[in-house]
Image (tube, rainbow, N blue to C red):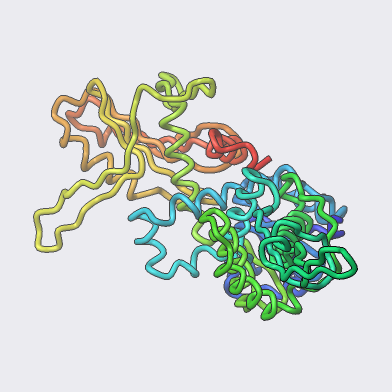
Amino acid sequence: MEIDTLYYYGQDGEAVPRDIETMFQLGTQEMEYSDKLKANVFRIVGFIFRERKMLAVFPKHYYELHEIESLNQTNAEAAADMRLLFHVIKKYSETERTTASARAYMGADDSDTYDADYPFAAFYKIYDYFRRYGLYREKENKVVSGGSGKISWKASISKSQKIISGGNLLFVPLYVNKKNDRQVFITECMAFVIDYTLDYFHSFLSMKKTGLNIARFDYFRNIDYVLAKLHEAKNAVFKDIHKKLVQSLIDFFSQYKERATGGSVHVKIRHYDMVWQRMTARYLNRHFVGMNPVSHAALFDLSLESSPVRFSAKTYKADTSHNRFAISLDHTAFVNHVLYVFDSKYYKALDKLNYKQFAYGEILRYYYPDMTEMHNILFLPGRERAEVHFSLAPDYVGERSMGTKIIEQYLEPKTVMKDYLTGQAAWTYA
C-alpha cells in the first residue's frame, strides 16, 4: 500500500520557510544566506523525504510564488510536476555526469553536485528484469532422499535400493522433489524491492507493482542476513541474466545499508545550471527555426524534431598573451553568414549588464570576416517573453554596420523539461 505522505514545496533561490528548515533539518548543503532577501534560500533542486513528509524543491521560476504558498498551505500532492522533475534529474545524472563538462564542474567525486542516497540505479535494473521476464522463476529440480514432498519416481527407481517385502517391491529410501527455498527467497526479495520502492516514491514512480503477497519479514532490519542469503544464491544460480538480477539485489541492499543521512532520503542536485544548459541545448537543436526580425528573439517550432541550424558548445582561443585565455560559449552556430551567439543562464533575475555576453559578441565580430548578421541571446527560465538586455548606443557603433544588441529570452521551464525527456522509454517516467 502507498505510504501516506505530507508534501511541502520550495523553489531554488527563494526563501526557506523556518518551519520547513526545521522539519527537514536543512543545512548548508541545501540552503545559503541571501543578503538581498535577508533570509536563507534554497540552493538545491530535488527531493528530501523525512518521517512521512516530503519536500520538493523545484527549479527557478517553475512556479509563481503564490502557487508555492498555496501548495504549502494544503500539503497537496503535485504528482505530475514531481514526476517530471524526478525524471529530469534521473536522466541528467545517468547520461550527462560522465561528460567532460560535467566532470570539470563536479570533479572525480560528484557528491557535491548530485546526491541520491536511495539505490535507484539498482532498483531500475531489478525493475527492468521484472518488465522483461516477470518475477524470478528459474527452474531447478532439487531431489532429495526422504522427507515430505512429491515423490520423484524416476529418481527413486534409479537411485533407491529395491526391497521385496510381502510380495511387494519397495524403494528405500524414496526420493522426493524438494521445494526450492532459494528461488522463493530471490522472488520475494525482488518483489519487496520493487513494491516497497514504488510505494515509497509513489509521487513520481507509477510503474506496475508485482502484486505478490510475500511473508511478513523486515528486509531492512535484517539486512545482513538478506545480503548473506543473496551472496549464497548468486553462487548457485545458473544463467547470466539471473546472476545479474541477484547482483542488482545485492547492490540495492548494500547501498541502502551504507546510507548515512540520519533517517532522511535525498534525491537532489546542486548546480542546476548544468542541467538548464543541457536542456536548452537540446531544445535549440530540436526546435529553433529562425529569428523574429522585430523583437530579435529566437523562434521555435515545437512540432519540429531537428532544427536546420546545429548549435554546439565551442571554445575560442582569442588570447595571444602568456595567459592564453579562451572564451567558451554554450550554444553557437555560424550558418549562411549569420552568427548565433547564444548562452543559457540559470538566473533568478538579470539586474546587471552581462559583460561576458557583451564581450563574446565584440570578440567574435571580426573572427568571421564574411559575417553579415549576428544574434546575441541569453536564455533564462521564466514566463515566455523576450526583452532587450543591452543595445549599444549609436554614438558607440562607429563605422560598423551594426551595433551589439543582447536579448534576454525566457523559456518556460516546464516546457523545456518535458522536451528534455521526449524519446525516453515510456515506462521509465509513466
Classify residue 155 by image quadrant: bottom right
Foreground residue, 82 or 69? 82
Q: How many marks?
A: 0
Residue at the spot x=54%, y=55% of the render?
A: 239
Q: Which residue lies furthest to the front in this view?
A: 167
> Is 92 drawn above or below residue 311 in the view shown?
below
Q: Where residue 232 appears, x then y in whole percent?
A: 60, 74
**In which quadrant of the rendered image does the N terminus lie?**
bottom right
Left or right of 185 in this view: 99:
left
Foreground residue, 384 or 125? 125
Residue at the spot x=25%, y=29% of the render?
A: 334
> Is 157 drawn above or below residue 401 in the view shown?
below
Classify residue 269 by image quadrant: bottom right
Residue at the spot x=41%, y=64% of the render?
A: 106
Foreground residue, 206 or 318? 206
**In which quadrant of the rendered image does the C terminus lie?**
top right
Foreground residue, 141 or 99? 141
Left or right of 367 in this view: 298:
right
Classify residue 221 by image quadrant: bottom right
Left or right of 339 in this view: 151:
right
Q: Where residue 412 appears, x then y in whole percent?
A: 59, 37
Q: Where residue 118 appears, x then y in whole percent?
A: 63, 65
Residue 299 can be seen in this image: yes
Residue at the spot x=58%, y=38% of the render?
A: 425
Residue 9 can be seen in this image: no
Q: Where residue 95 appears, x then y in whole percent?
A: 46, 50
